[in-house]
Image: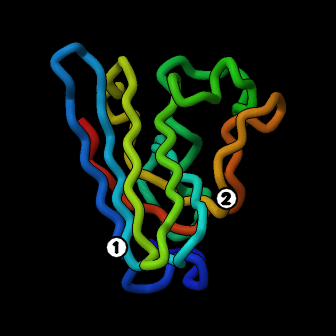
Amino acid sequence: MTYNPELVPEGARIQVKEELRRDGGTRIELRGRDLVPNRVYGAHVHTKPCGELPTDAGPHYQDRVDPTQPSVDPAYANPRNEVWLDLATDKDGSDRSIGTVDWRFREGGARSVVLHEMATTTHQGHAGMAGARLACINVAFE
């Protein structure tokens, strides 16, 4: 689902692969092709499936859920408690990123990956923020 065809062109290809690790952790790989060349995108696993509106995908999936939403506290909004998959495309509009966490998704708790307009920020009060939602991919996470 593309919400901004100028930044995620029709025909762009996104692939998400989940690997359940023997140690109880999870490895997520995100591959993007035919995106805008030489551009950075934020990308995160979200709690709900994609919908007509960018907000339909809900908030970022968190292993330990921040009681204050939207979550911008770096104690919760960080790549150890969420799955961050930012991309930095090459001249052909391609990139791949991998997020590895030491936990597994709760059943039905993770339903999509959202591409955002900028790299994910980490500072207090803005942690986990990455701008507008540009596209969404439904994923059947285990």
Q: Amino acid at mark 2?
A: Met
The residue tagged 2 is: 118
Residue 95, position as x, y percentages in the image: 41, 62
Quarter occupied by residue 98 = top left
Image quarter of the N terminus: bottom left
Q: In this rendered view, identify the residue nearer to me: 28 or 47.
A: 28
Residue 116, position as x, y percentages in the image: 60, 59
Display coloring: rainbow
Query: Label 1's element?
Result: strand
Mark 2 neighbour class, 10 Å CA radius: few under 14, some 14 to 19, many 20 or more: many
- Residue positioned most to the right: 125
For marks 1 and 2 on the same chain, the one whose residue lies earlier in the sequence: 1
Q: Amino acid at mark 1?
A: Arg
Q: Is residue 84 left or right of residue 25?
A: right
Residue at left 37%, top 30%? 100
Query: Label 2's element?
Result: loop
Image quarter of the C terminus: top left
Residue 37, position as x, y percentages in the image: 53, 77
Mark 1 neighbour class, 10 Å CA radius: few under 14, some 14 to 19, many 20 or more: few
Q: Is residue 70 left or right of residue 31?
A: right
Q: Is residue 32 left or right of residue 21?
A: right
Looking at the picture, does residue 46 appear above or below residue 77? below
Q: Gap in Å between the C-alphas at discs 1 and 2?
A: 18 Å
Q: In this rendered view, identify the residue nearer to me: 19 or 106.
A: 19
Residue at left 35%, top 19%? 103
Residue 75 circle label: none
Residue at left 32%, top 40%? 28
Q: Is residue 26 left or right of residue 10?
A: left
The residue tagged 1 is: 13
Residue at left 45%, top 75%? 93
Looking at the picture, does residue 52 appear above or below residue 23? below
